[in-house]
Image (cartoon, rainbow, N blue to C red):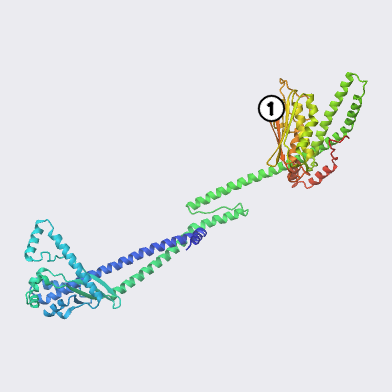
Amino acid sequence: MSYRSIKRVLGETNLERKCRFLYGTCLLLLITGSFWWYGQSTEQLVHSNNLSTGRHLVDAVLLKTHWKDDAGKTYGYDEHVQETGLDLEYVTYDWQVMTLDPADRDLAVTTHREERIHLPENEEEANILRRLKEIQETRDHEIVEKFLRTPEPETREVADELAQIRPHNPEGDLIDYSPASEAYYDAENEEYIYYQPIYWKHSCTIACHSNNLKAAYPTGVLVEDRLPFNVIKIIKKDAITQYALTKNRAYLLATAIITVALSMIALYLIVRYIIVKPLTHLRDVSDEVSQGHLDVRAEIYTGDEFEDLATSFNRMLAQLIDAQNKLTYVNRDLGGKVDQLAQANMQLYEMNCLKSDFLASMSHELRTPLNSILGFSDVLRGIDSLNDKQKRYVENIQKSGRLLLDMINDILDLAKIESGRMEVRATRFSVASVVSGACDMVRSLTEEKNIDLICQVDAEETPALQDQSKFQQILTNLLSNAIKFTPEGGRIGVKTERIDNRLHLSVSDTGVGIAEEDREIIFEKFRQGSVSQGDTLTREYSGTGLGLSIVRELCQLLGGTVRVESELGKGSTFFVDIPWEIEEQPDVHENSFTSRIDEITKSKHGDFVRIHGSRLSESPEPIDSSSGS
């Protein structure tokens, strides 16, 4: 099973299925291991019992064989043989004496005991006898060596007696110990086969079998060196035992299956009714709440953690409903505030439109008599019969008229920008020529105040693609502002350069400077910087406070920015940054203020667009500031 399949089974299924799968898997492994271990232990116990039975049968065979010759000779021997026979009378078996060496079989023939002496039937049985012989010789040798090395005095005395009995081979005598054996199950014949060597004691060759051995070896061969290696083979029918084992395995398997099945049923009931049912109820309540039925509550009375969870869920639901009610009240109040704000914005917009209409109309109406006044002042200035006092009056009239005309032009420009009717007309022009021309236009004013005007312009090869008139107006306003606030003997610098396809313009002066708190408000409409009363540097000209505001609006219209760096009493520097080539003409039909008004009020005032359009259509056409009437 792949990782993705395991993840899908364990991580992407419901809780009930995951519990059944995990618990069932663990239970199956645990029960399988337990019953397998129990079955193996049972079979091992049966095998051990068969080995014990085989040893007892070997003892019984030897006892019965010796009983034929020794019956009535030894005290208690007959009773022991009968007791052993009674213990094993329920066992059905057969036995044979096996030998590897044919000479040993001839020895048995000589002693007239050949009826049960057999050679191995096949190579496998011969290998079993060889292994038993090797084990017997190895164990005999090890035990005798250990016996002879024992330091106890009693053991050493016994060792000396053994050495006297068998001087040629002191380690040849055997000691009683658990015999070596081999066994296997013959499934074809359903028989249990057990092999065990016959252990000869030295006394057997002297007391019991000395006559037979002498008859077999009349030439006087050493009896001690010709002890034959014989193995008793027990053949016991084992069908009943195997049937019992098979039946036991079937019982174990059936018990395991029944245990797993009952456990899975119990697990299903526990998970279904103790775990899943409360969770399902909580889910159903959540679904009802999500559908808007806020009066439902979780009802779990189990007295455990699920009841605590249901109580917490109900408490959370009550808090959510309370918070929702508060939020609904706040939203309702906020809706009223939004309506009030929309109405206020509507009134503000209408007042702003009235203000713009009034300023445009007033400025337009004021220009005609103002131009007449300036014209007549020029005529009066040309009369030679005027005395000095009269000429000074005429100059005052001209200065005041020009100042008033500049103020009117600023108001008209601002009204044009706010109305959204100021369009960008991009043309190719030489920045150096425009900057040089603007400096030449104001040079007469700088010479009157003995101000040095320094112009540093890069001789660019590619003309800029911008609105020439608006760029020129920005530069003119900044120069006029610098001349106003620079005292006699000061210095004004104009510098342009092209960096990263952007036009950088800077206008610096050594004037009165701007206080830090005034550096932001000077770009607002009708706002000017303040100078302390004790300052010896004062403004030579007063104004409307619209020049820098117009500069900022024009910079934004051209896709750029304007900023100022200044130190009070040392001068100011204005930086203008606009694209060298304007990419596309900005949308000038609607300014930012009217766009925000539309966004706020269009959802609640459907006729606002019509009113807004009528206001723009009814406003008079703006008049260019360069026109004379």
Q: Position of residue 443 (x, y in %)?
A: 79, 29
Q: Position of residue 274 (x, y in %)?
A: 48, 57
Write the residue at 12% across / 64% down. 171
Q: Position of residue 516 (x, y in %)?
A: 67, 29
Q: Position of residue 430 (x, y in %)?
A: 77, 39
Please identify the quadrant where the C terminus is shown.
top right
Taking the image as shown, residue 303 lies to the left or right of residue 545, namely: left
Can I make out residue 177 in this image? no
Instruction: Report the number of discs.
Output: 1
Q: Where is residue 390, by image quadrant? A: top right
Q: Which residue is mark 1?
A: 515
178 and 582: which is toward the camera: 582
Write the residue at 40% across / 67% down. 258
Crowding at mark 1 (Cα within 10 Å: few <14, some 14-19, many 20+): some
Can I make out residue 153 in this image? yes
Taking the image as shown, residue 439 lies to the left or right of residue 313, namely: right
526 and 228: which is toward the camera: 228
322 and 22: which is toward the camera: 22
Taking the image as shown, residue 425 lies to the left or right of residue 158, namely: right
Note whether 312 is above or below 61 in the view shown: above
**Residue type, numbered disc 1:** Ala
Q: Where is residue 490, by image quadrant? A: top right
Taking the image as shown, residue 279 lies to the left or right of residue 470, namely: left
User: For numbered disc 1, what is the local secondary structure?
Assistant: loop
